[in-house]
Image: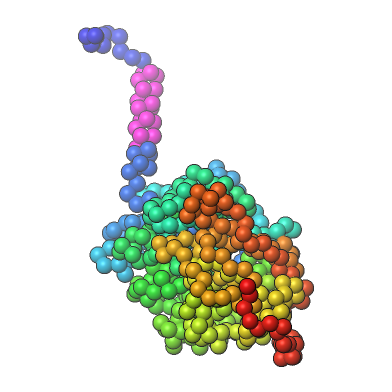
Amino acid sequence: TPHTPHTPHTPPSPRKAMTRVGTAMLAMGVATLISRAASAAFPPEQVHLAFGLSPKEMRVAWSTYDDPAAVRNATVWWGESPSGLTQSAAGETTRFAADPGREWSIHTAEMTGLRPGGRYFYRVGDTAHGVSTVFSFTANLPGDGDGPLDSPQLHVIYGDQGAAHAYSLCYECGASLSCEDCANRTRGVVSEVARGAAMVLHVGDFAYDLDEGNGTTGDQYMRNIEQVAARVPYMVSHGNHERAQRFAHYTERFRHMPSLTGSVTTDNGEAPNNWFYSFDAGLVHYAAVSTEIGSDFPLMLPRMLLWLREDLKSVNRSETPWVVVHGHRSMYCSCDGDCDAGALYLRLQLESLFFEHGVDLFINGHEHDYERMYEIHRGKTTQSTVDMRATTYIVTGAAGSRELHEPFTRPQPRWSALRANTFGYSRMTVHNSTHLHWQQVATQKDSPGDMAKYGDVIDDVWLVQHHHGSFSRHQKFWDDYDEPDVGTRK
């Protein structure tokens, strides 16, 4: 159709002309905003939460791949509705330069003034370079009655999870490094968010490995867990697979842990000490210990042991009656040679402290299997799960990695309650000051039969303790106790 020129003697009215100009300017503005959002050069990714130092605080960390450094106004915005992110806080930015020829930024920020147990929405980023989607979380609850701690609190616990073969994360995860967006959220760790999980605890060995591929495997692992960790605090302790660059990737990626234990130095420089630290979650006091520094940084070991003694001594059992210590390597286990000299070394350092200060549970990974033990005191057990007279030990290192399974090559000792050489993760549901419900969830996918049972509970036990505190009052009992059978279980 030929173009008809505008008639010169019928110009548009001034009002219409202004309207057209305004509409055009508005369209240009919207287009500019869309263009900027679409072309954000350095969007935030790998968002993951951590508890703060009090229930009124929640910390968040994320990464941007801005080389040269461009993101200078890292910010978190939060509020009590997705459209009401009325509060904000400036973040801190740390450059990661330990990988040869590659630099990127880690940002951390803290949301404060939270209502314990309240639901909050948040997003992170830099308005000039890109912001995240809106996530939500539930604020921590104290154990002292300052909040509605009137329902069970679910803690999800596991170790030894890779970027590839992360079978416990969700049903779809397999041999590929990427498993960022699980469609089926009814099973696996992703399902625990909908179940109301209060936190995740990962007891060492991440990604396999965080530093691999010049750090790109670690990047992908952090992208994979964002679907959980951006909604639930993802608390950690480190393992032997984090050793590279003096634990630089672990230390920096999780630098927002609520630590009051000074600093450590890695190949990336000085950072907050997340190798050993403690925090409270509801009725539980958690203490993270490093099972690695004894061999890698032996001069730090006395410092950690002194801190642990003082930390355990300071726990108020009327507020946090349950005390859980977690680390990576085993103190007790029965699968293979890991359970010999290395385990004995840790027992010599830690077992008497646990007994003196009444540590209820020690939880670790490292063995790529699951083994729940009874209370154990210097190799002895009464096989009790009620009013235990010593620490109960649990190995949950089977979340899934390229190293696959670690078979049990030895007979099962009397102090071992249940062993399973299957992928899986643990649920610890804290009902109150006396009752804790422990379950192991299978995530095996080796055969069609296994797949049909994905998500089944394969261990289910109640741990009951009416008398929290030092086990030293039971010393005479253990001195006099003669086990009825010191052999192995059939």
Q: Residue at x 39, y 74 (%)?
A: 243
Residue 318 coordinates in the image, percent (x, y): 74, 73
The residue positioned 73% from the left and 66% from the top of the image is: 435
Q: Is residue 262 magenta?
A: no
Query: Where the N terminus falls, by quadrant?
Result: top left
Q: Which one is nearer the viewer's eye here, 270 or 298?
A: 298
Q: Residue at x 36, y 15 (%)?
A: 13
- Which region shows up in magenta? 14-32
391 relative to 4, above or below: below
Q: Position of residue 119 (x, y in %)?
A: 62, 51
Compared to residue 401, the image places residue 445 above or below, namely above
Give the x, y percent position of residue 368: 49, 67
- Name the image quarter holding residue 241: bottom left
Q: Nearer the viewer, residue 137 or 376?
A: 376
**Residue 120 showing in the rendered view:** no
Q: Position of residue 300 (x, y in %)?
A: 46, 85
**Which of the 4 quarters of the picture holds residue 383?**
bottom right
